[in-house]
Structure formats: structure tokens, C-alpha cells
Amino acid sequence: MNYKITSLFTFVLASVAFATPASTDEENGTTLDTIPNVVTADIKVGIERHIEELSAANGGFFPIAFDGNQMKLKLVRVHMEYLANLGPRRHFACVDLASEDGNVYDVDFFLEGDPGNMTVTETTVHKLNGRPFYHWREQEDGVWVHVEADDASRELLGVKEGSDAFEFTYQATLPTMAEPAKMWIPIPTDDQFQEITMNRIEIPGEYQILTEEKFGNQILYVELQPEDSGKIMVLHFDVKRQEKAVFVDDTKPELYLLAETMVPLNEKFKTIARNALKDKNGGDLVRARALYDHTIDSMKYAKFGSGWGQGNANFACDSARGNCTDYHSYFIALCRASDIPARFAIGAAVPSSRDDGGVSGYHCWAEFYAEGKWWPVDISEADKYAALATYYFGHNPANRVEFSRGRDLIVEPGPESGPINFLAYPLLEVGGKPVKIKPQFGFKRG
């Protein structure tokens, strides 16, 4: 496909169509000074109306033929940054639409017409979950052409698609303990997307496995004595993991609208969410994507000073920085403030570029509920790698292992410090007082 425009991206940056007074549109014989100026807002209205009308006529889904199939899609967002006027009565829009199974399609639309009366003339699927099927390239004569992507199925940065399998080692050295101590450690469990085989548990002291009832976590509870100081504890297990996409489970979404200690539900977050969702038309999927983008735009991945790493939504909001726990706590607070159920999970991200070695530490992600399904998101990774922002809205790679889910975890026996904020590293109390202990993670693919 060829398009004669001076530069697509020049027009992307322009909000008003250019026109030379008294010049002629040879196709229909009109002069440009009689053609209305078109701003990006007009194009947005035009494409949203097109999607809304076709969806209304097709059971609430936007129909599009792709790869021999007739797909049923839902609007996620219109890319405001790519709306463009290509010349007299010719316009371009790029839109994200999601399938029922959570795949996100980036679709290019070409339109013709004046404000309030635009007609879509061409619809093409450009990307699937951030992977392009073609690129735009400008030729010397100023014509933009489709160039097929060399390898649309390539492994994305840091992402293993499909499935993964590896051995995982969770190891820590106990500090010096002058008094009896207690420790709580997460034990990963099976779910729809991962299968865990525990090979060995090497733990000094007496231990038992507790069940945390609210979220179904398994937690290793250990009682230690001063003579256990300096000893090494090891968990070694096999992981078979499937890439996580949109899914259904039997949990009650309304349980994930409630406040938590570090994720409040108050007017502060309701106001921020309202402002982020201003002028956003559509259902919870559209609103969640807007909050996802707002979080990326508002936060900076920066681990310095104090306060970060606690998953404190207030800290994230006030400082606009933090690690994955802070990003996702802020996002969850905004979702719940907008009546969108959202929840937290934590584990580790195993490198995709090598097959053994160390793992830098824990990693966490979130899920929100829309269209009757749970949608996984990884916003801190999306912020680091902009090219993967679409992928991470609705996907969690296969090279992960999930340790635990939820916040404010309650078990019996429990810590004297109260409910567990979240559980990835061992929670150790010596004489009833918290003592930090950071484990070492390692992995090996077969």
C-alpha cells in the first residue's frame, strides 16, 4: 500500500490540517479554502463513532477479518499521538482493540470526509500484542509504503512467549540471632498457568506449612533458635509455566474493590482517577487502559532514598517514583477508586536471554477485572520498555514464577507486626522484632 503524504509523522505532530488558500483538490474540483480544517479531536470522534456503530450492529463487538478469521473485538483506546490529517478530507487513525481472549490488535484506519461525516475506507491489522506485521517506510518521492516485518514472531525483550520450564532455587543465610525467632516464607503453588514440583526443603529448626485462607497462599512457618544463626535454608522446585493472557477464575471480583493498608480507597485517588479518565468514552477496558497509561506517564522507575518498595500507593502518588510494588499499588488504587476490581501478585522474573544463573530479586504485577475476565498487567516493565507497553497490557510472560497473591496476608501463627504486607522474601522476626533477610534466587532450564 502506498500513501502520498509529505510525512506521516509530521502530520501526527500537527493538530490542524494545512491548506494553501485557493489551491485545488483535483479529485473533486473543490478549492481547499472551502474544505473545513480538521483537528485530531474530529478524527477521534469519527473513528470512535465508526467503531461504536459497527459494534452496536454486531452484538457489542467490532468485527474485523484477519488471518482467515472473523474476529470480535472491543475498543481499548484510540492512539491520540498517531491521529493525523493526510490532506484534504483524508485522515489516519490507529486504534487498539482487544479480542475476547485478551489479545490486543493495533489496527490502522484510513478515513475520508469532513468533521461529523467521516467514512472509513481502509482497515488493516498492524500489530498483535505489540508485534508488527508491517512497518511504515518513506520513499525518496515522499510516498509511505507498507514494508513487511522481517520477523513478527521474534522473542520480545525479556519475554518468553508460549511456555517455559526451569528449576528454581530460593536460598537464604540466617543472620545472627540472640533470641528465638520465627520466619514466614512463601511456597509457590499450582494454578491455571504454573505447575510446581517441590524437590526439597532444607530448613533449620521446626517448620510447618500454613494456608492463608483469603487468597489461598501456602506459607512455610519456621521456628528458629539462636544456634540456627548462620545456617542456610533452601527451597528447590521445578516450574512449568504458561504465558498468562486474559483468563476467567472463580474468585469474586467485588472482593478486589476493598482498601488495604498500603492501598487506600479515598477521595484523593478518586479525584486523580476522575482526572485521568476525563473524556474517556467506553467501558472498564478503556478506562483501565487509560489508568495504565496514566501510571506510566506519572511514575519513574527509581529506587533511591527511603519509602520505595513497600507497595505504598500514597508514597507512589506523592513521590512519583518507586519499583514494581509502587507502580502496581498506585494502579490498583486508581482502579478500585474507579470501581474496577484489581489485585496484586508477586514472584520472580527469570531471564529470557540465558538459561541459568542468578535472578536479581522479586518482581510483581497486577490484574484488573473487565469484560468478565481478569487482565494481567506489568506496568513497571512497560515503562522500561515502551515497545512492550501493548504486550504487557493483558499478558504476563512464561518466564515467571508466582510466589504469592494479595496484600495484608493473615495466618496463624502470624507475625507480631501484624498482617503481612506482601510475601516474596522471608519475613523474619527475632524476639518479636522484624529483621531484614534477602534471599538469593537461581534458575536453570533443562
Image (cartoon, grey):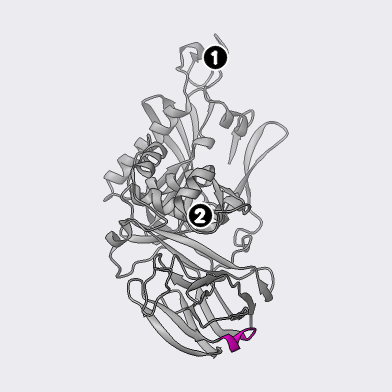
Q: Please, which residue is most extreme toward the top here?
A: 22
The answer to whether any part of residue 108 appears in the image is yes
Name the residue: 50% across, 64% down: 396
Q: Is residue 74 visible?
A: no
Label 2: few (<14), some or many (≥20) within 10 Å? many
Residue 176 vertical placement versus 274 (above, below):
below
Q: In this view of the protein, which residue sits in the foreground, 422 or 226?
A: 226
Give residue 16's position: percent from left, percent from top. Answer: 52, 22
Q: Nearer the viewer, mark 1 or mark 2?
A: 2
Which quarter of the rendered picture does the C terminus lie within? bottom right
Give residue 208's quadrant in the image. bottom left
Residue 12 versus residue 284: which sits nearer the camera?
284
For label 1, the SS is strand
What is the CA distance from the residue labelled 1 to the residue labelled 2?
A: 56 Å
Residue 45, compared with residue 262, is above or below; it is above
Looking at the image, tell me whether mark 1 or mark 2 is earlier in sequence order. Answer: 1
Q: Nearer the viewer, residue 265 or 297?
A: 265
Name which residue type carries label 1: Thr
Picture residue at 45% right of the left edge, 48% below the top = 314
Q: What residue type is disc 2 on?
A: Asp
Residue 334: x and y in percent read 39, 48
Circle 2 residue: 326
Which residue is at a point 47% across and 23% down the rendered structure image?
Answer: 38
Start-end of magenta stretch: 226-232
Q: Residue at x 48, y 85 (%)?
A: 223
Q: Secondary structure at mark 2?
A: helix
Asked if residue 187 is among those painted magenta in the image, a careful observer would answer no
